[in-house]
Image: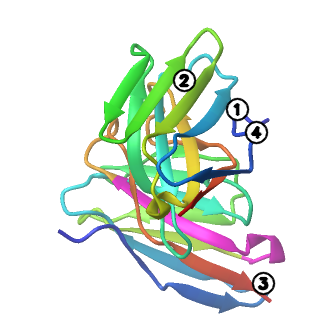
């Protein structure tokens, strides 16, 4: 079975631009969460979606938004990119809300 | 406010010996804890978890211990193998917020042949 897949794997943007990151969860998984990981730190929670509804939001500005589609795939959008948005963005899915999350390999976003 | 802390940035052990990775937490509402392993250029891989109603959980070479009174958990790897060399993250969540994992900073484990 395919794991969590994320696209693209790498992305280079300039300040002020907008970016969309995509995630396909493991088949049948209804919960998708997004995390940001900067170098030397653990992942930080951005959003969780369950059954297409937002279940939680971390301490990130409104420039960050997300959505989940009927097939449970998800997109993370970031507007007005700042240098500090450079990070690894991870998507994780779980079968149900209370089960361990399984991560994709992430999208490496670099802001110039 | 760092609710989950891994105070040792790195650990080096000899192949065949025990590796012990430690994690402390401050939020007493956490009731589920997980360990993830991460290789470079890959996402974190789930290893083992423990509920707050237990004090130990085993899965093969991996054992997690939870001491609720001390708000401390540890991951034991016995015997350690060179392929275990990776960054290990401790994570936690509490009921009602199960989609939000709170991660520690990670500990880099090196297992020497």
Instruction: From the viewer's perspective, tell me whether residue A83 is left or right of residue B93.
Output: right
**Label 4, on which residue?**
B7
Mark 2 Cα-neighbour bin, 10 Å: few <14, some 14–19, many ≥20:
many
**Label 3, on which residue?**
A16
Q: Say if mark 4 contacts mark 1, CB within 8 Å.
A: no
Percent x, y for residue B5?
71, 36
Count of all numbered marks drawn on residues in the image? 4
To the question of a shared chain for discs 2 and 1, the answer is yes
Residue in the foreground of this view, choosing between A79 and A48: A48
- Report how far apart the C-alphas of labels 2 and 3 lie in the structure: 38 Å
To the question of a shared chain for discs 4 and 1, the answer is yes
Mark 1 Cα-neighbour bin, 10 Å: few <14, some 14–19, many ≥20:
some
* B50 lies above or below B78: above
Q: Give the range drawn in magenta.
A: A80-93
Query: Is residue A84 located in the magenta-colored stretch of the structure?
Result: yes
Image quadrant holding the N terminus of chain A, namely: bottom left
* B32 lies above or below B67: below
**Label 1, on which residue?**
B3
**Label 2, on which residue?**
B30
């Amino acid at each position: 079975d395919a794991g969590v897949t994320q696209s693209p794997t790498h992305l280079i943007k300039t300040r002020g631009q907008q970016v969309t990151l995509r995630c396909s969860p493991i088949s049948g998984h209804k919960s998708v969460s997004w995390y940001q990981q900067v170098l030397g730190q653990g992942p930080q929670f951005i959003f969780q979606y369950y059954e297409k509804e937002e279940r939680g939001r971390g301490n990130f500005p409104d420039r960050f938004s997300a959505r989940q589609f009927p097939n449970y795939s998800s997109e993370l959008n970031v507007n007005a990119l700042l240098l500090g948005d450079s990070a690894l963005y991870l998507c994780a899915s779980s079968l149900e809300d209370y089960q361990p999350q399984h991560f994709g390999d992430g999208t490496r976003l670099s802001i110039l | 406010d760092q609710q989950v802390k891994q105070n040792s940035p790195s650990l080096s052990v000899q192949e065949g010996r025990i590796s012990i990775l430690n994690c402390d937490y401050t939020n007493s509402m956490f009731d589920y804890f997980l360990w993830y392993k991460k290789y470079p250029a890959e996402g974190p891989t789930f290893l083992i978890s423990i509920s707050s109603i237990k004090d130990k959980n085993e899965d093969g070479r991996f054992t997690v211990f939870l001491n609720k009174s001390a708000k401390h958990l540890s991951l034991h790897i016995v015997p350690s193998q060179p392929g275990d060399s990776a960054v290990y993250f401790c994570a936690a969540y509490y009921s009602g917020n199960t989609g939000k994992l709170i991660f520690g900073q990670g500990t880099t484990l090196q297992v020497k042949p």
